[in-house]
Amino acid sequence: MTLPHDPLLDLCAPHIASPDVDVDPAQHCIRMCFHGLARFGVQLTRVAESKNGLDFVAQQPLLARPYFRAFQPAGQ
């Protein structure tokens, strides 16, 4: 079977993937959840915040495994 990418590269190449962006008007900031390489073979989700939508600063702690999504149901 031929894969469209190199699986070893997924285990060791630093990257940022699967961004999920939310605007928080009350706090006047934009939060972006994303995942990336934490160490060899381990990808984790974290959040970064921005005041202008261009400059994001990653926050601690690491949140979860990759593809983590959080949302607040409408009306809550």
Image: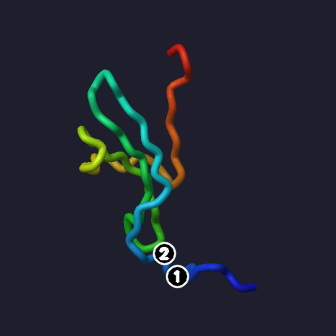
Graded by Cα atoms within 10 Å as few (under 14), some (14 to 19) or many (20 or more), the crowding at tag 2 reads some
Q: Residue furthest right?
A: 1
13, above or below 44, in the image: below
Q: State the CA–CA distance, disc 1 to disc 2.
A: 5 Å
- Numbered circle sitting on residue 68: none
Q: Residue 23 at what x, y percent from top left?
A: 38, 33
Q: Which residue is mark 1?
A: 8
Q: Residue 37 at what x, y percent from top left?
A: 41, 66
Graded by Cα atoms within 10 Å as few (under 14), some (14 to 19) or many (20 or more), the crowding at tag 1 reads few
The one nearer the camera, 44 or 4, is 4
The one nearer the camera, 31 or 64, is 31
Q: Residue 61 at what x, y percent from top left?
A: 32, 47
Residue for point 44% across, 56% down: 35
Query: Which of the image's four quarters has the N terminus?
Result: bottom right
The one nearer the camera, 75 or 51, is 51
Q: Residue furthest bottom?
A: 2
Q: Amino acid at mark 1?
A: Leu
| Residue 21 placement, left or right of 52 | right
Q: Residue 38 at what x, y percent from top left?
A: 38, 64
* For the residues bearing labels 1 and 2, Cβ distance under 8 angstroms: yes
Q: Which residue is mark 2?
A: 11
- Residue 44 falls in image quadrant: bottom left
Q: Secondary structure at mark 2?
A: helix
Q: Amino acid at mark 2?
A: Leu
Residue for point 50% across, 15% down: 76
Residue for point 24% across, 50% down: 55
